[in-house]
Amino acid sequence: MPHYSGTIQSKLPRVGTTIFTVMSRLAAEHGAINLSQGFPDFDCAPELRALFTKYINAGLNQYPPMAGVPVLREAVAEKAHALYGTEYDVEHEVTIVPGATYAIYTAIAAMVRPGDEVILLEPAYDSYAPSVEVNGGTPVYVQLTYPDYAIPWEAVRQAITPRTRMIVINTPNNPTASVFSAEDLRMLEGVLEGTDIVVIADEVYEHIVFDGHAHQSVARFPGLAERSFVVSSFGKTYHVTGWKTGYVLAPRELMTEFRKVHQFNVFVANGPIQYALAEYMKDKDAYLNLAAFYQRKRDFFLAAIAGSRFTPLRSRGTFFQNLNYDRVSDERDTDLAVRLTREHGIASIPVSVFYREPPQHRVLRFCFAKSEETLSKGAEILSRI
Ligand SMILES: Cc1ncc(COP(=O)(O)O)c(C=O)c1O
């Protein structure tokens, strides 16, 4: 095996293997019920699979256009207009990308210079801070309040300095399962007014908002839409996380810079998948019924663990249910997550890993994008602990 004997000064010295990989590996080793990593254990619609093979067999196997195939960009723009009332120009303001993580990285790489500050709300999806740091930026953290995971607006206001280039928001929110309200977005609009601060709105769970509420996209708010990269992912919406395909909406000025980086980073997203998604998007029910589908799973899981000593925190969106374990153990969440996998055969994600400094709260995140059989087995184990 070749061996590099030079010196490497890591650009990301604190980054190791992600907790998702660690927990999924541990779950596999111990044959545990895996409610850790956020992906479904059921397949996507057979129609979607058939469309993918249809376009492969039709020979659409070469590079698609850099910004994405026009039919998919049109379908995305139409959806955004129908749901959020904002028009995005298909030619200049919609880009199809290989996944939301990529989109977030690319937007940061296009905007953030060494010395720039980027406000992140903690707990934060794990890709944000490394994406900022590898581009020379400095993450500035503001913690959501516990246990309701609300945004402390005064703290956000105080975190803004002349060096603030960007703020990243994520609603519906992973890992907290909270959802930001219209009032939150109006607050953000007010806080950013008169600044050049750009927003990345990670809205990959846009179609998974529960209890009759509507998703509050930044696209709905003119003062935010004009400064935002809106990021979404087909992986979450159509149960195809492995397809790694998503999209970005942004005003032309921002998208021009985004595409400069995109062009030399990946150039294009997967072609036949884009044609398949464009055709599948004609069936609006597939995304409009998604919230009800996952709400049933949330409620099924909650009913099944009702007798356990874990205390559910409110899950308003996404496919995660957080459980407080004050009545179970005083171990650190990272220790408990490992022990539950090894000794009890159930894997979860410790929420502290989404913070720079682990907080005192005792919370584990469970993914309910699973079959009822898996959820029942998981709940049975939790009820015995
Ligand atoms: C908040 C959030 N953003 C982004 C992603 C990544 O999406 P993709 O697989 O399209 O890169 C995820 C996936 O778990 C997520 O939870």
Image (cartoon, rainbow, N blue to C red):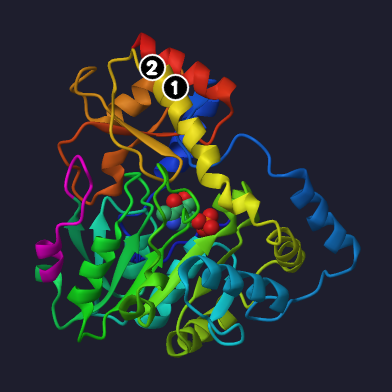
Q: Residue furthest top?
A: 384
The residue wearing badge 2 is 382
The residue wearing badge 1 is 346
Q: Which residues are magenta?
A: 145-157
- In the image, residue 231 lies at what x, y percent? 47, 67
Give the mark nearer the N terminus: 2 vs 1: 1
Residue 3 seen anywhere in this rendered image of the structure: no
Q: Which residue is more in the foreground, 195 or 214?
A: 214
Quadrant in the rendering for residue 60: bottom right
Q: Which residue is more in the foreground, 79 or 342?
A: 79
Residues under numbered marks 2 and 1 in contact, where contact means CB atoms less than 8 Å apart: yes
Check residue 69 for magenta coloring: no
Q: Residues within 10 Å of mark 2 (few under 14, many from 20)?
A: many
Q: Which residue is more in the foreground, 281 or 116?
A: 281
Q: Would residue 98 be found to the left or right of residue 109 on screen?
A: right
Q: Residue at x 50, y 31 (%)?
A: 297
Q: Is mark 1 within 8 Å of ligand 1?
A: no
Gap in angstroms between the C-alphas marked 2 and 1 = 8 Å
Residue 369 seen anywhere in this rendered image of the structure: yes
Relative to 124, say whether 305 is above or below.
above
Q: Residue at x 40, y 65 (%)?
A: 217
Amino acid type assigned to the residue bearing label 2 in the image: Leu
Q: Quadrant of the C terminus?
A: top left
- In the image, residue 187 lies at what x, y percent? 20, 68
Amino acid type assigned to the residue bearing label 1 in the image: Ile
- In the image, residue 261 lies at what x, y percent? 51, 82
Q: Main secondary structure of the magenta part?
A: loop
